[in-house]
Image (cartoon, rainbow, N blue to C red):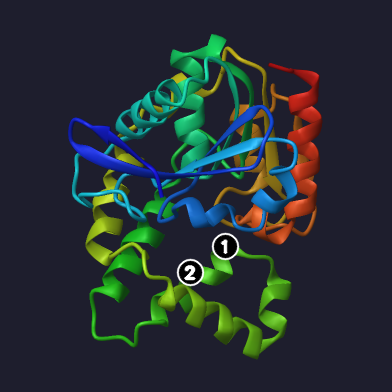
Amino acid sequence: MPTLERPDLTLHYTVTGTGPPLLMLAGFMSDHASWTPLIPLLSERFTCIAPDNRTTGQSTPWNAPVSIDHMATDAMALMDQLGHERFHLIGHSMGGIIALHMAQHIPDQIASATIAASAPVRLPRNTALFANLIAIRQSNAPPGTWLRALFPWLFNPQVFDDPKALDAAIADALAYPYGQSADAMAHQLTALRDYNGAALAHPACPAQALIGGVDLINPPDHILSVLNHLPHHIIEGAGHSIHWDAPDAVARHLTAFALQHPI
């Protein structure tokens, strides 16, 4: 993986495909691998650029200072290094917050922004959920216990119809060599506690919201309470991991919106 050297961080990222640049910002606990279902659907039309946010993946050190501002600044520096004066942007969950922060600071550089399963409003319930997951990881529970507690919040209910497939997905997650540690997860959680959400709700660049119809972490009414002024699509049957539950729909809506706002 190529890297970007920052004053306090080595940022790893991937570049896949050809065409106009598309910056892809992963959510809480996730790195570039979060985009695995989506990149094959987009890489023939876009140059897909996916960094490992601070505290995740191969970006080091895991305990570098972390905030929404830090991660947005990293992303802006990355696009500057790659020479992309304008680009499309998608952010999932926390990545959507980072994208909205970027839209506030460099709107002229962002041709289009797709905010996926995200809204700039904190739900104390979600912070408690993540804190409880960290506590499970730091306990003597079997390694997959916290993932079994997390997955119902991430995916649509049909994922749980096949217990063997669920066991395989958990095994794959545990085997991933760059999985975020419990300490790094706790460190990153501070970024979600400290940002100013109210200031991010009105991006100055073209932006749309993609919403999972059965998202438990950011339900449709929660997202629309702050982003209903944006063009938006509710993808029925998709949970919080909207790009895993419905990658074709996400790719279709992102591409259509990008074509409306070419670079």
In the rendered structure, the answer to whether residue 236 lies left or right of residue 37 reads right
Q: Residues within 10 Å of mark 2 (few under 14, many from 20)?
A: some
Q: Residue at x 41, y 82 (%)?
A: 144
Q: Is residue 65 visible?
A: yes
Residue 150: mark in rendering: 2
Q: Nearer the viewer, residue 256 or 130?
A: 256
Question: Which residue shows up at 44% across the image and 40% down it?
Answer: 122
The image's mark for residue 57 is: none
Q: Which residue is mark 1?
A: 154
Depth check: give the residue in front, 143 or 224. Answer: 143
Which residue sits furthest top?
A: 108
- Residue at the image position 68 percent from the left and 16 percent from the top: 263
Is 88 left or right of 235, judged from the image as shown? left
Depth order, front residue of 110/49: 49
Q: Quadrant of residue 115?
A: top right
Where is residue 20? Give x, y as percent.
66, 27
Q: Crowding at label 1, few (<14), some or many (≥20) Cα neighbours within 10 Å?
A: many
Separation of residues labelled 2 and 1 (CA atoms): 7 Å
Helix, strand, or loop for circle 2?
helix
- Give SS at disc 1: helix
**Residue 186 figure quarter:** bottom left
Q: Is residue 10 above or below residue 263?
A: below
User: Quadrant of the rendered structure where residue 154 is?
Assistant: bottom right
Identity of the residue drawn at 51% across and 26% down: 100
Tell me the amino acid under the disc marked 2: Leu
Amino acid type, label 1: Leu
x and y percent of residue 80 in the render?
A: 42, 20
Disc 2 to disc 1: CB gap under 8 Å: yes
Residue 23 location in percent, x, y?
Answer: 55, 34
Please say whether residue 215 is visible from this viewpoint: no
Q: As displayed, is residue 88 above or below residue 25?
A: above
